[in-house]
Amino acid sequence: MPVNAPGGYRGRIAPSPTGYLHLGHARTFSLAHARASAAGGTLVLRIEDIDEARCRPEFRAAIFEDLHWFGLDWDEGPDVGGPFAPYIQSQRGAYYREILDRLRQGGFIYPCRCSRRDILTALGAPHEGEEEPNYPGTCRPAPGTPPPAALDLPGLDDVHWRFRVPQGEALTFVDALQGLQSAVAGVDFGDFVVWRRDDVPAYQLAVVADDAAMQITEVVRGADLLLSTFRQLLLYRALGWNPPAFCHAPLVRDPATGERLAKRHAALSLRQLRAEGADPAHLA
């Protein structure tokens, strides 16, 4: 499952159908489109819908309509096919399970019964923002403990699976737009969930598995995911895969509040801008 494959540049755009896409999404996806075009490469559209409780069919349909209205196209995806189908995460569950079992066999993950509330209580302070709180190690097994013999042993049907980070290791990567980035495992982020107790993969595992399988050579996304890149680099290393390059775009903010755009900012959704007759050429 090579990354940085010999076929040339491969980029991707990976929206989630949990709401209507906003101007920030469009500008980041436009950057991904431009970088793929400049390299004479391939652009992949992948629908990231593993959070099925929040995904809705109308949001999925709007992704295709709104991105085309904004002037974007792609070479592979759910609507046009391609060699790495399916391009919809909810249809790739068996593959994710195989990756999880590889991590288990390598001793990189362990079962965890802590809830998010348990983690916050153990840390003694509420967590701000959307980052996964730094795990205090409550369920972390002692060094040398062999991994469970299987993923589905009795008693392991209601647990998270958590990746054991190398405590104190300094990690770096060079981002195409943000420059040199550094973090310390166990300090800037802790052991993180790769599989949820409701039996679906967490974002970190799914995105690494798919980018590797689809031979993505550069990931273009928003700067709010810079810290997640370090978690993903550890997953690439554990699985023996070469990581792609990374390019994190500046966030687009609401001009009225200064907040970064989110799907709750309906006034700046592509759907609303399109309904108001906005010219997409003036929005890019």
Image (spheres, helix red, strand yellow):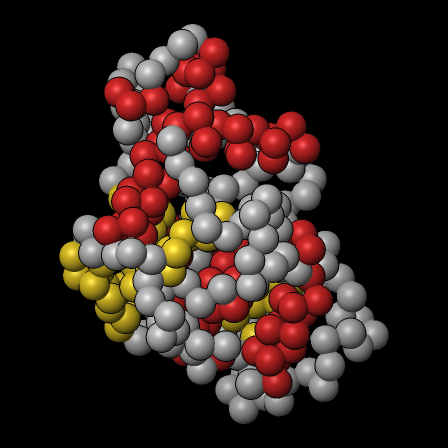
Q: Would residue 123 be found to the left or right of residue 62 on screen? A: left
Quadrant housing residue 244: bottom left
User: Which residue is rendered at x = 49% and y = 24% of the image?
Assistant: 264
Q: Position of residue 192 (x, y in %)?
A: 50, 63
Residue 97 can be seen, yes or no? yes
User: Which residue is rendered at x = 67% and y = 52% of the image?
Assistant: 90
Nearest the viewer among 256 and 250 is: 250
Q: Would residue 122 be found to the left or right of residue 61 on screen? A: left
Please identify the residue farthest to the top as the structure is shown. Answer: 276
Q: Give the vertical position of 61 relative to 243 (above or below).
A: above
Q: Give the vertical position of 275 relative to 73 (above or below).
A: above
The quarter of the picture where the C terminus appears is top left
Q: Position of residue 102 (x, y in %)?
A: 60, 80
Nearest the viewer among 29 and 227 is: 29
User: Which residue is rendered at x = 50% and y = 59% of the image?
Assistant: 207
Q: Give the vertical position of 97 relative to 41 (above or below).
A: below
Q: Would residue 16 be found to the left or right of residue 159 on screen? A: left
Residue 206 can be seen, yes or no? no
Please identify the residue farthest to the right as the structure is shown. Answer: 154
User: Which residue is rendered at x = 43% and y = 8% of the image?
Assistant: 276
Q: How many marks?
A: 0
